Image (cartoon, grey):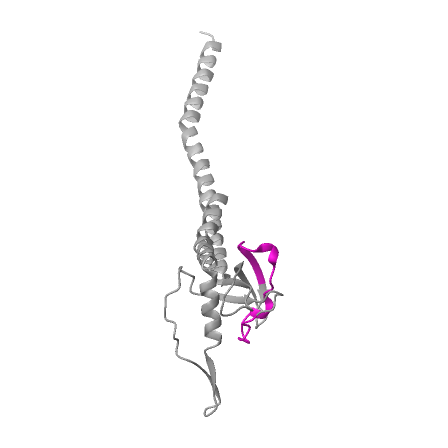
Amino acid sequence: TIIILQIMRFGVYSSIDSSLISVSNNASSYANRTMARISSFYFDAENNVIKPLPDSDNSKLVGTPAANTDIILFSANGTILNSFDAFSNYQNFHLDKRQLGTIVTTSLINFYGQEEKYHTITVRVHIRNYPAVAYMMAVVNVEQLDSANERYEQIIIIVMIIFWLISILASIYLSKWSRKPILESYEKQKMFVENASHELRTPL
């Protein structure tokens, strides 16, 4: 059972971790696209709204990131450069230079006070057009995967326990069933010996 659960955990997170490694291997491209996206907003004074400019760079990025991958950009002193989303957890992430190039699992409290689990990887980057960017962190929220994995693990454990109990009951039943002919033969032999002894003790 433990082996099955370990294989499940590995299978659930392997694709996520692979996508993070893919993004980190092309960090400059992702960081450059993120900064370009930040710079593409303008204020529409007529309607009093912020609007994005048409995306001039439609080139496909290298790698296959997970659908919910976020990019966080840090300056050399650890300041987040793209914490523009008030409802995101960007401000709760911190730069840790000791864990560069390593996939890290971390838990944070989100905007609504709920704990969420993330897989992250941080790498050093150098972008000619944006010299303030020194580090890039790729972040994937794995809370839903983790919750689903916990449910699957609970189901597997319950099923294993049920089958274990069934196997014990079946073993007990089969043990009694297989002993029945032996016990019957023993009783017949015992009765025969008792009858024979009785006949031998009876005087002619």
Kindly give the residue lying farthest to the right in the view shown: 77
Q: Main secondary structure of the magenta part?
A: loop
Q: Closest to the observer: 86 or 115?
A: 86
Residue 44 seen in the current view: yes
Which residue shows up at 37% across the image and 65% down it? Answer: 60
Residue 52: x %, y % from top left: 44, 80
Which residue shows up at 58% across the image and 61% down it? Answer: 107
Residue 27: x %, y % from top left: 48, 61
| Quarter of the figure that contains the C terminus | top left
Q: Closest to the observer: 1 or 109?
A: 109
Which residue shows up at 44% across the image and 54% down it? Answer: 18
Eyeballing the image, is 202 above or below 43? above
Kindly give the residue lying farthest to the bottom in the view shown: 46
Is residue 150 part of the magenta span, yes or no?
no
Residue 10: x %, y % from top left: 47, 50
Question: Magenta part of the protein: which range?
Answer: 81-107
